[in-house]
Amino acid sequence: MAAGTTTIAEAAERQRRLELKELLQKQYKWIDRKWDLVFWVTAIFVVAGAADITKQLFAGDWDFWTDWKDPQWWPVITAFATIIIPSALQYIQWAAWRFPTGATYTSVCFFMAAWVGRYFQWHIAENYPMNFVWPISTVCAGIILDWTLMKTKSFILTSLIGAHLWALLVWAYNYVPLAPFLQPAHFMDHVLTVADVQGIVYIRSQTPEYLRLIERGALRSFLGETQYVSLVFGGTVAFVGYWIGQFIGRYLAVWPIRRYLKTL
Amino acid sequence: MAQSQAVQQRPKEYGRSATTTGRSPNPTDWLIGWKPLFWGCALIMAANIFLWFWNYEFAFTAGLNSASPEFSLYYRTLFWGELLSLGVFTGIWYGWLIRTGREMVGQQCARAEEVRRIAILWSIIGATSLSIYIEASFWPNWDGSWHQTMVRDTALTPTHIPMFYFFFPLSVILALGAFIYGRFRIPELYSRDKGFPWSFFLLISAAVFECMQVAFNEWGHSLWISEEFFAAPFHWPFVTYGWLASGMFSVWGETILRLFEIEKAEEVATTDTHFRPHAVAD
């Protein structure tokens, strides 16, 4: 096609852009920014609640204590539990506004809720030190998951690529604050990690030591590879979690709009 | 009756043009359509702060032994007080919603008034959202820390009493109340002849299902597991609450679409003729 000529498709695209621009600048009588503000602020609570309860009841123990953040189960279960609601919000915000922000929005809401709960309920009310019960953050993984959707514009590719990145980044981002607690310590004639010492010193009368699901099975025979095997498997279960979230977003949040069960 | 008349008369004020004293009131002004949001959230937060400080003060001194007289004084009283206050609140609120709502059935609703009612519905939904956060995140954190460290001897533990027996039923009450509000006051979306909306079905069933899960949870804890492991499969059904609460986004979605329809009708009415009746005609 010679330069300077305009195809029908280009003209249609220009027309569409003009219409969208006009729509963007349209003045309504009653629809104003207050609706946006109320929506985005009040949605924080339900999103934070849904994300936090999903994480607590699927992977809570691994998030509650530093000594549970092990190389075998923590990267797997946490990746699965934390991606579900971000995936749902990613669908909702993409379907509604083409905003690639749902996972980040959810991660920030979840981060705030987790810290409020951990500070007021675990630290203030129950006297656990924050460096024993600090919560993880999924903000970095959320940004990358949204970036993946923005670049691929495909939920299938986002689930395939983004879910594995999610598992990797949730672990990597939170390994930074965890690393100091994995340093060796000499405690009662044994070499333990600092996190292990915390788990012994701070009494959890309902949570006996034998319940910690670490150092089991073939963990030792895999030597240093365990961590990487866990991360790859974590990406696989995060893929499943991503599609559970998509189901929630598609069929429990968007599909029911203006649908009715039956005439009563 | 007087209240419902007031509701009916208010739209005329919104329809007036600006006067020399300033612009006419808008149904989406913060202190008109959104006022219930602030009051609702303030009351919920006040109740939450009260219950938090109550537990902070008495959980370790009176909440460890359910057979003690201190427990009866501070916690069984609180338990019955919560149920009683919720019952009274529900009776008054639902009674008012239904009584005044029935008088509105079949009456035409001005566009500005419908916008105000949608803002009030959003306010109730916003308060429900806050209640859901408190029951799904704020209190479960204390419940987790409590049960991981204390051995329980009752279903009415100090953390269960605010969470299970106040905020769980409160969310049911708010979600159902929002539907009753919409059923009578926003007939274009929720009138009886349209059937039961999926959005509210999911939202209400989420809250009801959660209360049923409490029964299963306590029965199970009394039978085969105490609370050694918080992420036990036995606890998993609780997450469905957070998932089904996605119905809230459907309520937001369908009311936003309705707002655009109202705006369109208003635009047509003002451009077509100056004498068009001020009512939704679409």
Image (spheres, rainbow, N blue to C red):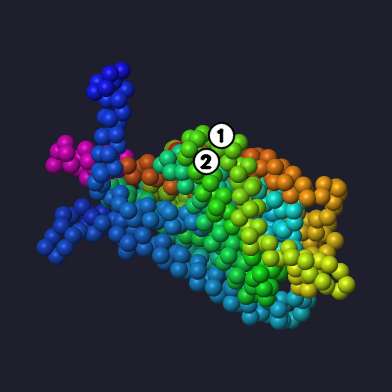
Q: Residues within 10 Å of mark 2 (few under 14, many from 20)?
A: many
Q: On residue A157, which mark appears? A: 1
Q: SS of the residue at dot 1?
A: helix
Q: Closest to the observer: B184 or B173?
A: B173
Q: Residue A127 lies in what quarter of the image?
A: bottom right
Residue B168 rendering spot, x and y as whole percentages: 60, 60
Identified by mark 1, the residue type is Leu
Q: Residue at x 43, y 54 (%)?
A: A40
Query: Is residue B83 in view from this perspective?
Result: no
Q: Please identify the residue farthest to the right as the structure is shown.
A: A189
Lower sequence index among marks 2 and 1:
2
Q: Looking at the image, which residue is at 57% across and 66% down? A: A116
Specify the label residue A148 is tagged with: 2
| Tag 2 and tag 1, C-beta contact below 8 Å | yes
Q: Quarter-wise, where is residue B224 in the image?
A: bottom right
Residue type (three-letter) at the residue carrying disc 2: Thr
- Say whether residue B154 is magenta: no
- How far from the left and from the top, in percent, is residue B126? 45, 57
Q: Is residue A133 visible?
A: yes
Residue range of the region highlighted in magenta in the rendering: B261-282
Position of A177 relative to B106 (above/below): below
Q: Where's residue B6, x and y in %?
A: 30, 60
User: What residue is shown at x 58% (from left), y 41% (from top)?
Assistant: A162
- Residue B64's mark? none
Image quadrant occupied by the N terminus of chain B:
bottom left
Choose between A37 and B213: the one closer to the eye. Answer: A37
**How many numbered tags mark residues here?**
2
Front position in the image: A202 or B145: A202
Specify the subunit that label 1 lies on: A
